Image: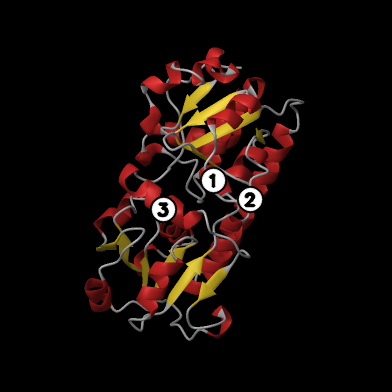
Amino acid sequence: MAGKPSIIPHSHLLSTALFLSLITCLAAVAGPAGLKSSAGPLANANSPAKPRVVSLAPSNTELLCSVGAREQIIGVSSFCDYPKEVTGIAKVGTFISANLERLARLKPDLVLLVSGQEELAAKIKNHKMKTIVVDNNKLTDIGKNLKALGRLTGHYQEGEAAAQKFEGRLQELAQIVEKSKRKPKVFYCVWPQPLMTAGKASFIDDIITSCGGTNIAGDMAASYPRFSLERLVLSNPDVIVMPFEARNQAFIKQSPWNKLQAVREQHIYYLPDQKNDMLSRPTLRVLKGMAWLGGVFHPELAKELANWAEPAQARKTASK
């Protein structure tokens, strides 16, 4: 297993201040993938062909831009930071709250939210604004959401094309990962104190599995459950992935952490800061994060995965 890379090219776990509040919401998330409209079935929602949209989740903002709907975004959350073109758009809320007066002044045709924001969606709906909650609990939801948001915003062809390309990339990844016979046991630390991880219902569990790892919390039903140190010791993972905020923390050198195989063999990896974290945000950029994670799990495939993440034609274009 390779040691810690000096630069980790991926991921986004949300901010420290927001994190525990958000986890409380996400822990209860469940339901079928798709879009849930406050106006009833989405197909019957009477929206303009090119609706003016407020996006209160960073992943929705990225996906809207991926289908060509950037010019229709009139408001975003304070956590929407990619692509850079959206940073100048009016800020109308966070992940768990919205400035309802400012939102009303914008007069959006649609307010887009994600799984875990149902309570916020209800508040906005009570102010006579149409809301749509986008499910993003599984890796495959990215393709579904690209298609759905493309249809919703009048960019059907762009959405279909982006989804098809994404799904094709996932198939390519599966073919590469299949070359390895190993499936390392992985502990993905969502938060160290209290200790939280990614359970079976989470987007992260899908990522770990798709990258050829075995999530030691994969039998836990909740999306982001608490995880006991006792169970961590008994599971003794081969690889540990930690949040950026855990860097240089003393507990890693203390018992029982220092007794874990992954720690002793220096197979503990840290996510980069929020702006450079591609792994945890369900958008097209997750592919680069998965290439890195796959290389952590299977060092012998790291070069091939890096080439997969950035095809030769893209590298050639970037070097011009």
Residue 174 is marked as none
> Which image quarter holds the C terminus?
top left
| Residue 304: image location, x then y, percent | 63, 27
Q: Secondary structure at mark 1?
A: loop
Residue designated by label 1: 225
Total marks placed:
3
Question: Residue 251 lies in what quarter of the image?
Answer: top left
| Residue 124: image location, x then y, percent | 36, 75
Which residue is depicted at the point 59% across and 24% down? 233
What is the distance, in whole Å, between disc 2 and disc 3 at their CAs? Answer: 18 Å
Q: Decide: marks 2, 1 in contact (CB < 8 A)? A: yes
Q: Is residue 48 left or right of residue 293?
A: left
Residue nearest the observer in this picture, 14 or 61? 14
* Number of residues whose C-alpha sits closer than 10 Å to that of mark 1, classed few (under 14), some (14–19) or many (20 or more): many
Q: Secondary structure at mark 3?
A: helix
Residue nearest the observer in this picture, 225 or 304? 225
Residue 60 visible: yes
Residue designated by label 3: 22
Residue designated by label 2: 221
Q: Decide: marks 2, 3 in contact (CB < 8 A)? A: no
> Which image quarter holds the N terminus?
top right
Which residue is depicted at the point 29% across and 79% down? 107
What is the distance, in whole Å, between disc 3 and disc 1 at their CAs? Answer: 13 Å
| Residue 53: image location, x then y, percent | 37, 71
